[in-house]
Image (cartoon, helix red, strand yellow):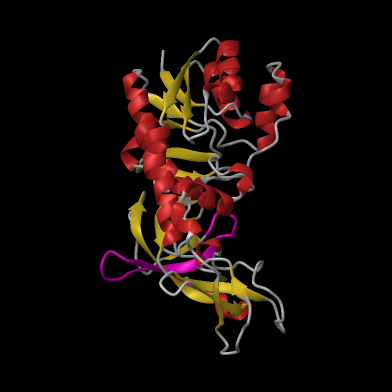
Amino acid sequence: MKKVLVGMSGGVDSSASAILLKEQGYEVVGCSMLLSPSDNEEKYADAVEVCRHIGAEHHFYDLRDYFKNTVIEYFRNEYLAGRTPNPCVLCNSVIKWDKLFEKADELDCKFLSMGHYSRIVQDDKGYHLKRGMDEKKDQSYFLYVMKKEFMPRILFPLGEMIKDHARKICAREGLDHFSRKKESMEICFIPDDDYKKFLLDNFEEFRKIKPGRIIRNDGEKSVNKHEGYPFYTVGQRKGLGGGYAEPMYVSKTDPEKNEVHISARNGLSHNTVTFSEANWLEEPVFGEAYTAKIRYNTQPAECLLEKTENDLFKAVFQKTVFAVTPGQSCVIYKGDTVIGGGIIQS
């Protein structure tokens, strides 16, 4: 029997994935990862219940120290550098596609699965990462960092489904409270989605940062102050004070001077995005037309792909894109196939 390790949070999606794989004839092994400092085994009682319900063994994997030293440390360092991190992308890389595969090998599981709404498709040219069929839930943006050699071992049972189907799968198994669970859109280690409070509570460096000047890019003077540069991100509109003739947005932050620069909306429109640390799942063709997403909740925009010096890549857009944010990811698509992506520099 084919053995699969299923990363299980106790939520609807990973629970439905485990149920489906069991029905498809796999030997399912559930694994719940302890990641954030506040995680404990009680948090994953629902994952244990699902495994018991379908007759699967369940394991806990304590990665709290590793997670703190990688994902949380990166989160801290990026904000100190005046960038806006995407911890979910890093977590997919160092936790889900590295550590969880180590656990799969340890438990003699050939396959690894999670409740992602994405697809891996095989054809005569190999394996390809594609968008999930549910456009509202598609998570391929976060998955471009996976290693191509792992793709034959990854299973995404929900890739062809919409969210409502996952709820119905849990409901028909008698797991009614699973089907009614609210969705979590927050970063898993940030209570109440308040990243400012998290940084201030956990790192002394952020408590030492004082209010500073707000600089208008149009040359006009502003008497408004900001609360510290790390607590602002490109495109942000709130927290900039009043007295402006038109809506103003953060255009950049300056860690050295502790300044926040602001602009009218047209000052945040750009035709090019430069990115580094690229991971290519398909061979990129420079000068060819692609689409790209510069953050998770945006629509793909048409662009050409270029290679520049020093392992930098550039997406040149046909129409301007708004609020290019250093630290976020630029992910390149050809149709519904993920070509690859990297970390936005400018």
Any part of residue 55 in sight: yes
Q: Which residue is depicted at the point 71% across and 76% down?
A: 242
Q: Quadrant of the C terminus?
A: bottom left
In this view, 310 is above or below 95: below
Q: Which residue is depicted at the point 41% across and 18% down?
A: 3
In this view, 246 is above or below 59: below
| Percent of width and height locating residue 200 | 53, 52
User: In this rendering, would 315 be left or right of 179?
Assistant: left
| Percent of width and height locating residue 276 | 35, 61
Count up the numbered dots. Answer: 0
In this view, the residue in front, 153 or 202, is: 202
Highlighted magenta segment, given as a residue range: 295-319
Q: Quadrant of residue 237?
A: bottom right
Any part of residue 320 in sight: no
In the rendered image, residue 283 lying in the magenta stretch gets the answer no
In this view, the residue in front, 34 or 288, is: 34
Q: Which residue is depicted at the point 68% across and 25% down?
A: 178
| Percent of width and height locating residue 2 | 41, 17
